[in-house]
Amino acid sequence: MVDNRIKEYRKKLNKQQIDLARALNIDRKTIGRYENEKSCPTLEIGLLMARMLHTTVEELFILKPDHIPAQGSDAGDQSACRDEILIEVTRNERISAK
């Protein structure tokens, strides 16, 4: 599972959901779904959000180590959000290894 601190960082900057939504060109309700962990932003939105909230992706989104599936395990019940992040992390590791 991926936790996030979107609401915490947004409130530190005295921003409302609508402010963040307009800056990202998405619906305000989508910000609410992200904050309540009902949905997960795309990598692009997550990166932009971290920048707008003056933090890092690692501070904004917390990947719980106990929820990372073991290699070869069935990821069928794993969240789509975490799977997207793991795919991106793997891609980035391959790029940086070159």
Image (cartoon, rainbow, N blue to C red):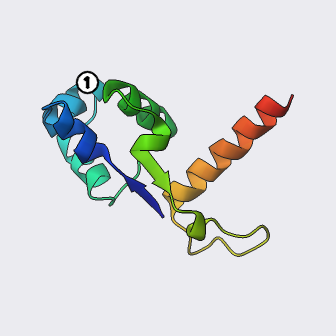
84 displayed left or right of 12: right
Q: Say if 57 sits above or below 30 in the image.
A: above
Above or below, 1 against 21 in this view is below
Q: Nearer the viewer, residue 77 or 3?
A: 3
Q: Is residue 47 left or right of residue 34?
A: right
x and y percentages locating residue 51 in the rendered image: 39, 25
Q: Is residue 3 left or right of residue 9?
A: right
State the residue at coordinates (20%, 47%).
29
Q: Is residue 94 above or below residue 62?
A: above
Residue 64 visible at all: yes
Q: Is residue 42 visible?
A: no
Going 65% across and 70% down the picture, which residue do you hit? 75
Q: Residue at x 21, y 27 (%)?
A: 22
Q: Quadrant of the C terminus?
A: top right
* Image coordinates for residue 88, horizontal then vertical, percent: 64, 42
The kind of secondary structure element at disc 1 is helix
Q: How many marks?
A: 1
Q: Quadrant of residue 23?
A: top left
- The crowding category of the residue bearing disc 1, from other C-alpha atoms within 10 Å (few below 14, some 14 to 19, many at least 20), is few
Q: Residue furthest right?
A: 98
Q: Please, what is the three-letter code of the amino acid marked with disc 1? A: Ala
Q: Position of residue 76 (x, y in %)?
A: 61, 73
Q: Which residue is mark 1?
A: 23
